[in-house]
Image (tube, helix red, strand yellow):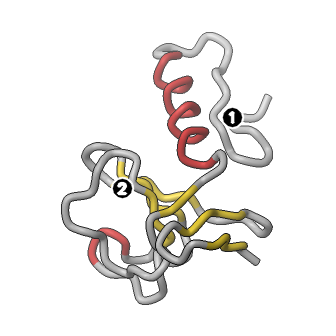
Amino acid sequence: MPDVSAILSLPYIQPNQAQKHDTHNEGIRMLDALVQPAVLETTLNTPPAGPVSGDRYIVAAGALADWAGHENALAVWDENYWRFYAAQTGWMVWDQAAGNHRLFD
């Protein structure tokens, strides 16, 4: 059995796994971030000051600081740090700042 799902790479709970709640909780975090995403902005290349848990952005080109190396990824603030999800062809987000959809191709 694989460790993750084929499309979203959601973690599977493995037979005889200790700490099963950790794997389950990680999957829930990923679903929360990736299902029907709306981002605050798609033009920032530096993390904003004072993010709130659940804030989402698409990292712009030339990313700096905590976002360095994560261009075009979906960045999600998770209380104490940024989580990054690499976009896949066909993913669509609602860009709240621009008032339109963005399609990753």
Numbered disc 1: secondary structure: loop
In percent of width and height, residue 69 lies at 44, 76
Q: Quadrant of the C terminus?
A: bottom right
Q: Which mark is residue 89?
A: none
Give the residue displayed 50% in from the left and 37% down from the top: 29
93 or 66, nearer to the observer: 93
In percent of width and height, residue 98 lies at 53, 77
Give the residue displayed 66% in from the left and 49% down from the top: 36
Using the rendered view, name the quadrant where residue 1 is placed: top right
List the single residue furthest toward the front: 99
- Look at mark 1 in the image and give the residue it sits on: 3
First reached walking from the N terminus: tag 1 or tag 2: 1
Q: Amino acid at mark 1?
A: Asp
**Disc number lying in front (1 or 2):** 2
67 or 16, nearer to the observer: 67
In percent of width and height, residue 17 lies at 57, 15
Q: Amino acid at mark 2?
A: Trp
Numbered disc 2: secondary structure: strand
Using the rendered view, name the quadrant where residue 16 is placed: top right
List the single residue furthest toward the left: 50
Q: Is residue 54 left or right of residue 5?
A: left
Q: CA distance from mark 1 to mark 2?
A: 23 Å
* Tally of numbered tags: 2
- Look at mark 2 in the image and give the residue it sits on: 82
